[in-house]
Amino acid sequence: MDFKNLFEQQKEFFNSNATRDINWRIQQLKQVKQLVIENETALLDALKSDLNKPAQEAWITELSYITGDVDHVIKHLRKWAKPRKVRTPLVVMPGKSFIQPEPLGSVLIMGAWNYPVQLVMAPLVAVISAGNCAVIKPSDLAPAVSAVLAKLIPQYLDNNAFSVVEGAIPETTALLELPFDHIMYTGNGAVGRIVMAAAAKHLTPVTLELGGKSPVYLDKSTDINIAAQRLAWGKWMNAGQTCIAPDYVLTTKEMVEPLVKALQHQINEMFSQDPATSNSYGRIVNKRHTERLSTYLDSGEVVQGGNFDAEQQYFEPTIVVNPELDSKLMTEEIFGPIFPIITVDNYLSAKELVIKRDKPLAAYIFTKDKNQQQDWINTISAGSQCINDVIMFNAVPELPFGGTGSSGMGRYSGKSGFDNFSHLKSILKRPFLKDLPVRFAPYTDFKFKL
Ligand code: NAD
């Protein structure tokens, strides 16, 4: 495929102003929803093939997420796209001042493999809402989903505005040479840096949705059974391959044993005694990542699980108590079903440990102590937070989704996505009435004193 030609055709269509029409955007958004609804089986099958995703889990975390997002955006889009009035100061009276959101142009969307439908389609919803065109590059590590999207998107969306490019590093490298108006990348930080360096050549703005180690602090005041159920769901969903999964738990000594027991109970409840045979438990994306995870078990005590089968891409739900803080398990993003539990002296030492590390994509605390809750909000810098839960902030359409520091930049979801992919253009509108003379030369003493 001639990417330059594709890009130029998109720009020509964009310059026709067709995408500025709110009705066109709503029509395209409805088509996104139709695509998901009418092809539910094909999408679920592809997710099963790439990640052994249980259908119900895939429906909740990928498909219904997108249809819900579309409904929310369509409901509010006309309001978001309206000029936003601001106060006009005396010096420019009479006049009117307002902010007019306008589309950017053509956006490159690069998805990751762990939620391969959602991580392409949810950014696309935001990109469409703001009136842009897009070149969509699904992850090559989820090839079944990539193929389905490459087939379906041209069938449902306006081909003048949206194209799918399949491929790996060579294709992405070629795409990154083009002067897109925005690049939306989801994936690891190393490639994030490649994307940002390529974007810099054209002064293209970027949204980088990256990862990190999202910590949990669990206080002794917590309801351990409810906490363990929420933690087990968040950690072992998609076999731990979730960017906002709880990465590790910090807790005090007396809580370690009750927490391990409560998590073991949840593993049995959710995935049975033998998760390898459970229809509710996913697989690691490939052999290489399964082997990577197996190297994380060399520090600390494995109190649950630890078995894996690289050929089958299977890794058992695993709990490790007190690995070294400088071990691979505690320095790299785990992105798999291993749950380290680290003993700390108290809340303050947990906080100190978190603050010294890179800013995570999410930070979680389980406590009934209102002061601790507020202090966590006030002092821990992270993309997002939940108090007494994990991941579920992402189910609130009006909460922006995005990282900070090494976990990323830019945000989307609902209005934040609309704003992210819009230029917020400032406009001052004036009639032909005489101005106050003070602003015009000659600058006499008299005018200055005014
Ligand atoms: P990945 O391997 O699918 O890569 C992401 C994209 O980058 C793909 O489209 C891929 O083709 C492209 N790519 C890979 N190498 C490249 C290169 N050298 N040059 C140009 N393009 C290249 O996904 P991944 O990076 O393994 O994803 C896992 C990471 O993503 C984790 O760190 C996770 O936390 C993060 N993540 C973040 C979010 C978020 O929303 N913040 C969501 C999911 C995953």
Image (cartoon, rainbow, N blue to C red):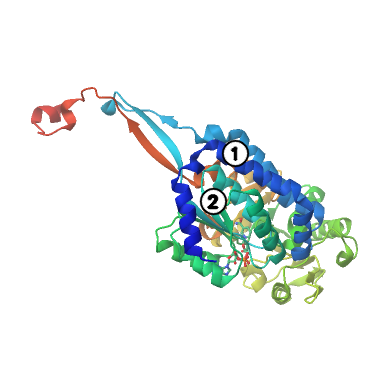
Local secondary structure at mark 2? loop
Q: Residue 121: image x %, image y %?
A: 64, 52
Amino acid residing under circle 1: Ile
Left or right: 410, with 260 as reference point? left
Task: Give me the disc on residue 330.
Answer: none
Q: Can you say which quadrant of the picture contains the C terminus?
A: top left
Of the numbered discs 2 and 1, the one sitting upstream in the chain is 1
Q: Eyeballing the image, is 414 above or below 435?
A: below
Q: Is residue 295 visible?
A: yes
Quarter assignment of residue 343: bottom right
- In percent of the image, x 66 and y 63: which residue is there? 113
Local secondary structure at mark 1? helix
Question: How many C-alpha atoms fall within 10 Å of the one at disc 2: few (<14), some, or many (≥20)?
Answer: some
- In percent of the image, x 71 and y 43: which residue is there? 368
Amino acid residing under circle 2: Asn
Quarter assignment of residue 110: bottom right
Name the residue carrying label 1. Answer: 26
Q: Can you say which quadrant of the picture contains the N terminus?
A: bottom right
111 or 253, nearer to the observer: 111
Q: Residue 338: image x %, image y %?
A: 74, 66
Q: Residue 150: image x %, image y %?
A: 65, 59
As measured in the structure, the alpha-carbon distance from the residue carrying label 2 to the one carrying label 1 is: 16 Å
Quick one: which residue is furthest to the right in this view?
273
13 or 389, nearer to the observer: 13
Left or right: 227, with 78 as reference point? right
Name the residue carrying label 2. Answer: 160
Q: Is residue 389 visible?
A: no
